[in-house]
Image: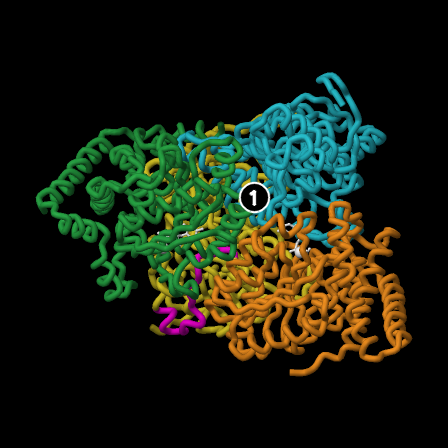
Chain colours: A yellow, B cyan, C green, D orange
Amino acid sequence: MITTESTVRQVTLAQAIGEALAEEMRRDPRILMFGEGTATKRPDLVAEFGPARVRNTPLAEGIIAGTAAGAAATGLRPVADLLFAPFLCYAMDEIVNSAGKLRGLSGGQFAFPMTILAMTGAGWGVGAQHNHNVEAWFVHSPGLKVVMPSTAGDMKGLLKTAIRDDNPVLVFTDIGLLEQAGPVTDAAIPLGRAALRREGDDVTLISYGKTVATCLDAAARLAEQGMSAAVLDLRSLKPLDEAAILASVRRTGRAVIVHEAAAPCGVGAEVAAILAEKAFAALKAPVVRLTGPDAPAPGNFMLEQALLPSPDAVTAVAARLCAGPVPCPA
Amino acid sequence: MITTESTVRQVTLAQAIGEALAEEMRRDPRILMFGEGTATKRPDLVAEFGPARVRNTPLAEGIIAGTAAGAAATGLRPVADLLFAPFLCYAMDEIVNSAGKLRGLSGGQFAFPMTILAMTGAGWGVGAQHNHNVEAWFVHSPGLKVVMPSTAGDMKGLLKTAIRDDNPVLVFTDIGLLEQAGPVTDAAIPLGRAALRREGDDVTLISYGKTVATCLDAAARLAEQGMSAAVLDLRSLKPLDEAAILASVRRTGRAVIVHEAAAPCGVGAEVAAILAEKAFAALKAPVVRLTGPDAPAPGNFMLEQALLPSPDAVTAVAARLCAGPVPCPA
Amino acid sequence: MHLLDLMDALRRMTLIRAYEDTLVTLLSQGRAGGTCTSVGGEASAVGVVSALAPEDLILTNHRSAGHLLARGADPGRLLAEVMGRRDGYCGGFAGSLHVSARELGVVLTSTIVGGELGLCTGVALSQKVLDKPGIVACFFGDGAAAEGRFHESLNLAAVWELPVLYICENNEWQAYVHRRETMLGDGIAARAAAYGVDSASVDGCDVAAVFDAAATAADAVRSTGRPFLLETRGYRLRGHLEPDDQAYVDAAELARWRGQDPLDVLRRRLEEAGLAPAELDAVTREAEARMEAAVAFADASPLPDPARLLDTVYA
Amino acid sequence: MHLLDLMDALRRMTLIRAYEDTLVTLLSQGRAGGTCTSVGGEASAVGVVSALAPEDLILTNHRSAGHLLARGADPGRLLAEVMGRRDGYCGGFAGSLHVSARELGVVLTSTIVGGELGLCTGVALSQKVLDKPGIVACFFGDGAAAEGRFHESLNLAAVWELPVLYICENNEWQAYVHRRETMLGDGIAARAAAYGVDSASVDGCDVAAVFDAAATAADAVRSTGRPFLLETRGYRLRGHLEPDDQAYVDAAELARWRGQDPLDVLRRRLEEAGLAPAELDAVTREAEARMEAAVAFADASPLPDPARLLDTVYA
Ligand SMILES: Cc1ncc(C[n+]2csc(CCOP(=O)(O)OP(=O)(O)O)c2C)c(N)n1
Ligand SMILES: Cc1ncc(C[n+]2csc(CCOP(=O)(O)OP(=O)(O)O)c2C)c(N)n1
Ligand SMILES: [Mg+2]
Ligand SMILES: [Mg+2]
């Protein structure tokens, strides 16, 4: 199918990944992709680009990431699929100590244009060795970029940009969103820009991944109760769109931060810290985080779901913040 | 030498580690210790406890941590020395996916009483593959505990407690403090309690590791300028002493958080987020973080040192916060 | 060395097959989550586990149901665990991919491929240092053998003389990748020599052969205190993770291995030995009946309070 | 295949030794940081690197000065890097443990033991996919061979047919642990067979032997496009990280290997071949003079602006 920049179609987030990969590989012959089962699961890419550019690997995440880093340093633009976020644990050295640090340490001699894909989060109910949101680790590590889109369109556009970026970018796919459909185009979406999903004046709900929908749901309920909630989808966790965060919260004076990852040292902590420093004068109420528990995810769908931040909880917290100004300290 | 609980002696932080290990191994025959060069570097422990309990390992951090986890689950209380924090990258799976999660996933059938030692931070000038503060990663991971002492006494007391704890505890040694001497006793120090190093009324400087000294230095300068700064040493990063943080900041109304780790999603972000939620009404000024750069550490002592938070910078920021109240938002 | 009771083996293998078939049905009805079945691996599971002593400990991987049932796990409690119920072995929090059962000596089901290899050395170290009698059996796949932890684990076990019986269940598949795509050479056992570890390879479709090889290997570990690598050669007869249409599997290869279905191999042998088909069919019916009761048990077990998990994270 | 010019080899090896001696002196004067010297490894470095072509690429480990100098690195710029000066190969940010030099085809000095093994496959993949002529030489130690990445790297290189010449510089030490404490068996080369990779082992104190073995190995990689593992057997003649009194080293073993000092071995050979001692001494003086100039160069180079690092982190 021939598509143009302006064509808008509905595809699932899973399909959006495939489209982004195919379009970018078509554009740039230096892009290649590999992972455990990549060739098996993407026969269309193998057919179009050949087995040299779409590869199955042995079962060894460390060498997959390392091979991506080495290839990136020397002329290729690899995309490595590491499947599930917890498996990144086997590849931390290559991602953090090599890909993230060696550009700086080499005085800029080498760049690492590589993309790492990993699914993350609840939605599958198979437990904590598949479901663990660790995106904050990479936000905390130098030289890396991190995105986690909440829509098919963002996934496609951000993945395309990630592949074009000359730095290592981790692209997290919220597994709970894989089958969600949405409009996509062929345009790349810049990293580092949040998306304001809903305008609002009383409180800003800040989120990313599947909890963006939780916030939109909460915002609708708040509207019914007469409160106007903005919903900001961070999308890009590193770089983080500080300007968009500050603009909305300076307007509303209140913020609720929602994500599935555990609270301590998570992305929500970073957002709250930014607000406490740079939106302090505008804050009318405490900044509250609502997150997944600081516990391993249970291996059962119902138990897993029961522990996620709910629209009810977000609504209640936001309503409480809006209920009245906290007395200003002397 | 025979010591009693009440004996107070001056030893270096490095010696404090050795004392804690020896005293605990003497107390409990289930404790054993291993790592790359552990037996070579601790001949006194080998002499006292024998080669079965003090071991050199092959050069393979993953299996060292995994062996610790497996042994911990089945009756031993291992202490694994993984040398430098960046090397933890090779052991993330065993620490995070196994030791941290399997107690919860097993419904409490197995516990993981193990201690992991790693040096971290600036002070040696050998670059980012030895010097990288990643303690926040483990704060962000379930089932783990994390300490990072700033004195010889705390190192000894907290390491003893870590070894006695029935959970995996990561004990980070700030390499810049290894040769600092201080008083030690034989008493264990509970995890989860911060130490107020200096009382103060106008601003709280919150820190851990070597930047505690930076804060004490700043506090002295602030005192000269007529400002009273409290200095809180977190010591235990998980569990974090929320009560102590809140108590001091509710009193002073101002906080500057200082650490060597990068800012994004660091421990400072967590502290700021806690303050923005739970001390909001007491805050008189923005919460400011002063941290090491979000960049790989350069492999040269002078360059490395130049990038650390300085007493000057902490003093300046704290003075600015104390200078005047930020106007209260409508 | 005790002898394998082939009828008992058939009972266990049939129960495993019935268990996995039941799980697949429950899955298709939306009553259980995705799972990696051990279909095709029954002879390896029962052969090896039957050669272990009660005091031996087990670590295994995502395809662990066979090992657990061979070890005597109650299918009702196992199913309850997979369905997230309070009466499961882990109180319902582990699901199918992380089941451990202290009372059975099953320390770990690791879903991180290689996790079992990373922890087994420590379990064996406990046995050795605390002078406990049992050896440690560590089950892993041909795919896991490509992870660095395989290398680190065998090397450490060799150097520290740890009593680990490594069992590589080579079923020719690693999720959606054929083993041939991931290594040169024809098996994992040959890699043991590099570490100074003895090894053997056995037909993983023949439970008697597996039992003999495992008993010999376990004896070696017991008497020398040193590790041993046993490779059982079989085939993954169902897909990787249910549901899986196996469209990527070479049909001829699959058909060839279906002809070696471990249950059929054993049935044929028992028939040749003179057992009546009716006697063998009774085994199947018995297994089906046990599974029916197991489903009823699991269904009746309540979901745990999700919040209870939070109290269990720390000791 | 070209022949090794032994006088040229002596020059390079002597320069390496003089460089390391200089660094140790600077360290003792507080003018340079701690470093892992390549003393004892000069024949391995010069023998292997001399067998490489200019278009070949190199990845190495914390003991990389020998490889860099053998490759023609300017000792002044190398010293400047170690001393954190602006004219160093990496602008002063790498220090001694992470030097890379694009202009020399040195992609990486990894201080993470095993990092070079993790990245070399990717570099070789670039060479292969982009149809570039050079092969990839990856230097690592006997200690690194215990890391899982060794296993993963050799296996992937074998399966994907990547042109990597693996050089394991077995110097019997892994920081403060003797190799014998970390593995059974007597060397790393024997482990290659498990991956279907050819290997050879050579006396690492004899530069001519190393060169011949490396040239043969490099030819094999070039002609087959497949990996090869060459093990050079030598000894770490100085401590792990300066300063190090080597109190933990068996004195007799060290003395035995000192008798095999690669520089002495080569000098003896050249003397036997008729070269006058004066000619050989001139080489030493020449190296010392180069190092004097190098120190002056590095000393004169300014520290970089620390803040410039922040601009370099991202491309
Ligand atoms: C570290 C890690 N990487 C990848 C996966 C995804 N995965 C689960 S099972 C599997 C295949 C395992 O193959 P093998 O070890 O041969 O076991 P088998 O499934 O064939 O029994 C893969 C790739 C995982 N669970 N863990
Ligand atoms: C992943 C990792 N673990 C540990 C270290 C600390 N360390 C640096 S060099 C070294 C010994 C390396 O031994 P080997 O690979 O034989 O190289 P050699 O130093 O003998 O040349 C160790 C343990 C490290 N730098 N990286
Ligand atoms: Mg398999
Ligand atoms: Mg060595």
Return the x and y of residue A81 as percentages of the image width and height: 45, 59
Hey, which quadrant is residue D95 in on the image?
bottom right
Q: Is residue D207 visible?
A: yes
Residue at 49 percent across and 71 percent down: it is D161
Q: Nearer the viewer, residue A182 or D214?
A: D214
Tell me the chain of label 1.
Answer: B
Q: Is residue D52 left or right of residue D287?
A: left
Return the x and y of residue C73 as percentages of the image width and height: 29, 35
| First to last magenta residue range | A44-62
Q: Nearer the viewer, residue A243 or C289?
A: C289
C34 versus B18 height, above or below:
below
Q: Which residue position is annotated with label 1?
A: B64
Return the x and y of residue A204 as percentages of the image width and height: 49, 41
Q: Is residue A153 magenta?
A: no
Residue at 68 percent across and 72 percent down: it is D209
D310 versus A322 height, above or below:
below
Hey, which quadrant is residue D185 in on the image?
bottom right
Q: Name which residue type carries label 1.
A: Ile
Please count the marks in the image.
1
Quadrant assignment for the C terminus of chain D: bottom right
Return the x and y of residue B321 as percentages of the image width and height: 72, 35
Q: Is residue C16 left or right of residue D253?
A: left
Quadrant assignment for the N terminus of chain D: bottom right
